Amino acid sequence: MKTRVVNLHVENYDIYIGRSRDGKDITNTRPTDKGWLGNPFTVKEYGRKGAIRKYKEVFYDKIEKDETFRYAVEQLKGKILGCFCKPKACHGDVIVEYLEE
């Protein structure tokens, strides 16, 4: 099964990939804790393309430098990732791109 991102209000998903309500995101959360894949760069502040571009930089830096993070991400292959953005472009597309390359 191919990894994909869905709108969590429309489809069922295996893992939530957004920020947590208490501000946890990819920059400040241990892998698998709530919010660990969240994008700290908001569309409001950076625009959709800018927020995704900045997330991609952080994501690939962590993939390269953090073995625990990389392993946790690799466990998501074939899963359905849930976020609020879809069907618009989403930081989850970065995760899917990595897992499906």
Image (cartoon, grey):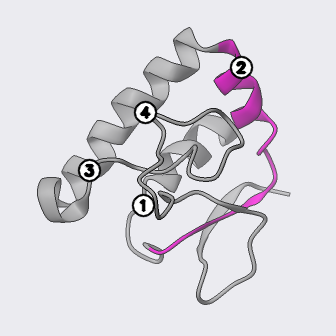
Residue drawn at x 35%, y 28% as measured from the top left: 57
Queried whether the magenta region covers residue 81, the answer comes back as yes
**Furthest-right residue in this view:** 1
Question: Could you tell me how far apart the alpha carbons at marks 2 and 3 are, in whole angstroms?
Answer: 24 Å
SS at mark 4?
loop
Residue drawn at x 79%, y 56% as measured from the top left: 79
Amino acid type indicated by mark 3 = Ala
Residue drawn at x 47%, y 57% as measured from the top left: 19
Q: Quadrant of the C terminus?
A: top right
Decide: few, some or many residues near mark 1? Use Cα within 10 Å; few <14, some 14-19, many ≥20: many
**Furthest-bottom residue in this view:** 10
Amino acid type indicated by mark 2 = Thr
Left or right of residue 79: residue 99: left
Q: Earlier in the sequence, mark 2 or mark 3?
A: 3
* Disc on res. 90: 1
Residue 87 placement (x, y as % from top left) = 46, 77
- Which sits in the foreground, 7 or 3? 7
Amino acid type indicated by mark 4 = Thr
Amino acid type indicated by mark 1 = Cys
Residue 21 placement (x, y as % from top left) = 47, 64
SS at mark 3?
helix
* Disc on res. 51: 3
